[in-house]
Structures are given as structure tokens and as C-alpha cells.
Amino acid sequence: MFKTYKNENELAKYLALEILKHLKKNKKLVLGCPGGRSLKKTYYYLGKLSYELKISLDKLIIIMMDEYVIKYKGKYRLVDPKSHFSCVRFSRQVIKKLLNYKKNKSNSLKLKNILFPPIENPKNYDKKIKQLGGIDIFLLASGSSDGHVAFNNIYSKLYQKTHITKLSKKTRSDNMKTFTHFNKINEVPQYGLTVGLNTIFSLSKKAILVLSGKEKRVAYRKIKNLNKFNIKWPASIVFKCKKYRIYSDKLAI
């Protein structure tokens, strides 16, 4: 259930190897991924180790968790994918770039295989995931101050599927640390399109929550003490998943 590594690099390398082992064995993999900094080292090692071990990422499908949304004249629209804080931008310029380390066209992660929720009908995302057979491994991160997972906060409902939500002030504050070009909280969008808590626990075959670094100490203590799902700390949804692991490094405990 809980596994501790001596540092973030060791954690990320082990996790990357675990993911690649699954991919090699099954020839394909549906992987749920958060944007932001929490899993960046894991993405780095996924790219490097897949190259060294000669494992193709051609059959890898990435299920992204969320994207920022702007409300204008009563209608919601996705933020410009070129924005520094866009999760679409992050998936293309960070995740795809890191995973495709020294890859050629035949063994690389394809752009068409990086999926995002549709803003027109968010619940269709859950249907799409079901059509894919579910998420083999869902990588999760926890907000450091409020335990948000994707954009699900304490006002989220357990059985919500993919939806548009209003972001809490604490979530927006945490996001300023993730996207460092934000100068003040008013620049952080107030809405987000996100997988729901139901999406996470009902459509994942295995979930792995990663807590590394000093900043995640509060999150680690909350998760450790709860040991079951509590909406006051949404990342505890990991406990409702069919199979789950919680990986941390020594700085987080």
C-alpha cells in the first residue's frame, strides 16, 4: 500500500520501470496522467528507460486529467493551448517531449494518443475511457494545501463523472507554484474541466498516488492518517480504487 523511496529520483525511476513492464507485457497501455510538476521526473524516466530498454511507446495512450476553462458571457471555453498554464501545452511540450526521448516515428508516443476531455459534453470522456477498456494505471497527485486531485476539491461529489468545476482559492494558489509564470492569483482561471472522482475510482484498474518533496508533507500525513476516502481531502479517492499504491520519498514523510 505505502512504499517509501530515499529520494524523488529513485521513486520516479522505479515507477517508470513498473509502467514500462506493464506496457512490454501487454503490448499496450492506457495511462492516466496529471499535468504539472509532481510526475515530471517519472515522465523523464519513462522516456529515457523506454529508449534504453527498447520499449516502443507506439501503443501507449495517455488520458490527461484536466484543463483550465474560462467562462465568458455565460459560456465555457478552454483556455488557449499556447498559454503557459495550459495542460494541453504541458502534455505536448513536456510529457510528449520527455517520453519521446531519442524515439523515431515508429516507436514514439503519438499526439493522437494524448486524450483530453471534450468541453462540449464532458461525460463523453468517461464513455471513451470505457471503450478503451478502462485506465490500466492512473497516476495521481495531491494538492499540497487542500488535497485536490485533478481539479476535484472539497465541494466535489463522489459520483461525479468528468465535469466543469469552479476551482477553490487553495487549488488556484497551489497552481501558482506549478505554473510559475503566474504573478498573482487573479491570473489563475477560476474554472476547470476535470475527470471526476467517479472517473478515477470506477474506471481505473490500478491507481498510484505520488507524494514527493517537502511540499507534500501535509498531504502525506493527511493520506496516512485517513487511510480511507474523505471528501475533505479529495486525493484520498485513491483508497476507493480497485488496486492502489501510495509512493513517497523520505522528504515527504
Image (cartoon, helix red, strand yellow):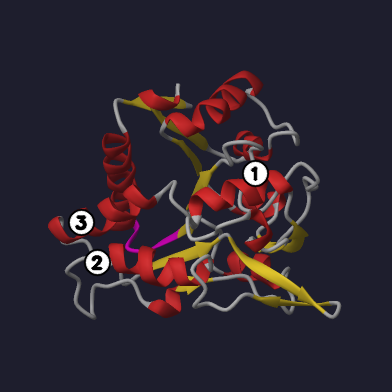
* Residue extent of the magenta highlight: 26-30
Q: Amino acid at mark 2?
A: Ser
Q: Badge 3 local density, few (<14 within 10 Å), some, or many (20+)? A: many
Figure check: 214 above or below 58: above
Q: Amino acid at mark 1?
A: His
Q: Point out the tag, 3 or 1, that comes first from the N-terminus.
A: 3
Q: Residue most toward the left?
A: 52
Q: Point out the tag, 2 or 3, that comes first from the N-terminus.
A: 3
Disc ID at residue 235: none
For this view, does 58 lie left or right of residue 194?
A: left
- Does 27 appear in magenta? yes
Taking the spot 56% from the left edge, 40% from the top edge, the residue there is: 142
Q: Badge 1 local density, few (<14 within 10 Å), some, or many (20+)? A: many
Determine the secondary structure under disc 1: loop
In the foreground, 210 or 213: 213
- Does 59 appear in magenta? no
Figure check: 170 above or below 219: below
- Where does label 2 land, which residue? 56
Figure check: 2 above or below 95: above
In the foreground, 157 or 181: 181
Q: Residue most toward the front?
A: 183
- Where does label 3 land, which residue? 48
Determine the secondary structure under disc 3: helix
Q: Are marks 3 and 1 in contact (CB under 8 Å)?
A: no
Q: Which-is-in-front pick, marks 1 and 2?
A: 1
Label total for image = 3
